[in-house]
Image: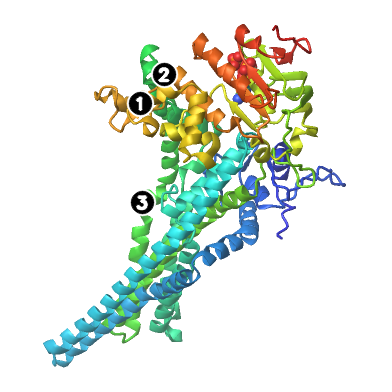
Amino acid sequence: MCSLRSLSTWSSLYHLFNTSRGLLPDDCSFPSHSMDGGEKPHPRVQSVYDAWLASRVLGRGELLVPGAHRKFSLLNIKLALFIVHNCAYDFFSHILSLNPVRTSVMMALNIIRSIFPAFRGYSQALIIDELQSLITSGNFTWTRLLHLVATELVRRIFESLLDSFAVANETIVMDSARFHVEYVQMEQRVRLDIPTLSDSAVRDLLHESDLFARSFSGSGFGLLSPLDFIHIISLVTELLSHTLLILSLTGGATHYGVLLLSIFSATLPLLVTCIGCPQPHSETLYTPREARAADRQEKMRNLAYNDAHRPEIELFGLGDWILKTWASARKVVLDSEQSQQLRDSSLLSKLNFSDFLFALQNIPLVLLLQTSSASLGSLTLYRSSIQSVILTSRNLLATSRMVFQGIFFMSAFCAGKTLKPKMQPDEQDAVYYHPSPHGATITARGLSYTYPGCSEPALRDVSFTLRAGETLAIVGYNGSGKSTLAKILLRIMDHDLGDLVVNGFDIRRYNPADYHQHLTAVFQGFSKFNTTVRENVGMGRVEKIRSRSTIDTAIHLAEADNVVDSLPYGLRTLLETPGFEMMSYSGSGCMGSLRHHGLSGGEWQRLSIARAFMRANEPQVDLLLFDEPTSSLDAHAQNQIFDTIDKISRSPTTGARIKSCIFITHRLSTARRADKVALMKNGVSTSPPAFQRPD
Ligand SMILES: Nc1ncnc2c1ncn2[C@@H]1O[C@H](COP(=O)(O)OP(=O)(O)OP(=O)(O)O)[C@@H](O)[C@H]1O
């Protein structure tokens, strides 16, 4: 492991690392001790995640914008080496294992093909020499010339065939690598929970990980493919082959001076390019203000282009405001890009030094002509080899820069795989959820929760008890914390303080995925999926998504039969969700062009209730939670739904309660149905401990 102790930015890293503790993988540790002798405390870069985080530190507590390029500094080189040591090997050996033969062939072909240019130059030099000798000897014959041209043609055909095979093979290797990387990306997204995903460091990490994944399909913001590590090897081989050619042409002590002059004149343009424009991408120089402007510019653009917002944009006359805000943000971004370009177009590059230096390379050529009896072919070869050395070196430099950036994006990808969802309990603490046959028992004591970045808690000191089979109604003013409490009870979010015990165990000891199998819920802001009715409902229990009878039962329980019957394709009707509405404005009446069909708010709500009912009847489900499930329904429909909920929560044989039930409501008539009512006010539960339901 590389030692990174002596690096100068440790103090700012220390601050950042400490603020990022909560989202790190298990294998990270953060010693918080001060070192003796007045040295500042520092974290140890122990994991790829640490290295990724460290590479983003700008100083003064600021971080690089996600996707920005890292400076080529000593610190970053050390971090890159650490990443390569700890993650690149595993990553590439995994890629190799996906397609071992083809990947090996790809690497071999890359190296073989890199020798071709030198070989091509040599072969052409042979033709020129042959022609020269034929002309000077006066024995010129067309047959001899045609023979030479035919040989060259065969060589080229062979080269092209090998090229097309190599490209086809590389496409297959890249496709399987791309699939693997995209799969891991998708897996990360679905595996991580809300608290983890809402962390800004995790979001940045996933952003860079996405860039890495996209670079496999060649659309990663100017990145070369990560497999261009191999490209570097082939470029080095190409460089070596040209150098060997030059050496063979200039062999002998008399030519060393000429050779040195050639190398000097060949590398000078590169040095000038490096000095002239050290930063390859303007993103690097984005200040936080510019990054905010870039973000705002994108948001305004989305507002202008997204049809879902069109009605409110028109109604509230937001057009001018969007345009003005976009324009001022865009100007900041353009100014930043302009000043970057001005820096790039330095005096040196304006004078076009490169061209001048290219011309310099003719001097060694002239010297060579004077000091040797070299043939025309070898002189041509010499000239083209020198040019190739320059171009290959340039390519090598550009590729190395890309790979250098790619290393950090790869670290984001590798670190993303080790991110542990915040709500997942440690293995030694985890317990399986055992559903109670009489419904879940919940005891909450002093629950408090503050949303990240907020100063005021959304919940403070909330306590209540729900016995097995009881029904609790949570009522309260807007913003009083009802939905927040629901999300904590549903284990979508984790409380900060207090105890929450469900069926005898601290809720934190349940794995969220296991816990969720034993409850069902309707969220206040439920999802409207842009898919068929069948899938919108069936997603409540995906293993039964193809079961017509289960879906029909759920729809029937939610009193949504009429909704489905009125749709032109019944369960197969594609539903139009906000954002897709404009598709049916095109004049095809009720039907959109793609069989999309809109629903009213109440109809959508019935489908969301049907989704929850997909699993409500299951014996392992012992808690039903509904967050304003009937807010868009009329009084009659609301009563019907609550009658159904009551029926589901009872045993069909004995009528005894077998499921506990919590519903959040603003309606007194609904609250009256509950055994208990909790009144929420400013995040505090102020209700009497028990409220007896009037008979
Ligand atoms: N994602 C969030 N980030 C920050 N603050 C939030 C977030 N969601 C809710 N809040 C805040 O938490 C507090 C409680 O919100 P919550 O949604 O729980 O209220 P509620 O009682 O369900 O309101 P309503 O009756 O309007 O549905 C509010 O002050 C709200 O602004």
Residue at 61 percent of width and 14 percent of height: 665
For marks 2 and 3, the one nearer the N-term is: 3
Q: Nearer the viewer, residue 305 or 555?
A: 555
| Number of residues whose C-alpha sits closer than 10 Å to that of mark 3, classed few (under 14), some (14–19) or many (20 or more) | few
Checking the image for residue 458, the label placed there is none
Q: Secondary structure at mark 3?
A: loop
Residue 229: x and y in percent read 50, 63
Q: Amino acid at mark 1?
A: Leu
Q: Quadrant of residue 612?
A: top right
Q: Amino acid at mark 2?
A: Ser
Q: Secondary structure at mark 2?
A: loop
Does 159 sit left or right of 139 as displayed? right
Q: Quadrant of residue 375?
A: bottom left
Question: How far is disc 1 from disc 2 in space, using C-alphas?
Answer: 12 Å
Q: Secondary structure at mark 1?
A: loop
Q: Which image quadrant: the N terminus?
A: bottom right
Residue 283: x and y in percent read 48, 42
Does 86 sit left or right of 692 as displayed? left
- For disc 3, the marked residue is 351
> Looking at the image, can residue 261 be seen?
no
Measured along the vertical axis of the image, is residue 408 above or below residue 394? above
Question: Are the residues at dot 1 and dot 2 in contact (C-beta closer than 8 Å)?
Answer: no
The label nearer to you, 2 versus 3, is: 2
Q: Amino acid at mark 3?
A: Leu
- For disc 1, the marked residue is 567
Question: Where on the image, by quarter, is ligand 1?
Answer: top right
Does 496 sit left or right of 356 as displayed? right
Residue at 42 percent of width and 41 percent of height: 342
Checking the image for residue 600, the label placed there is 2
Residue 136: x and y in percent read 17, 89
Q: Nearer the viewer, residue 420 or 370?
A: 420
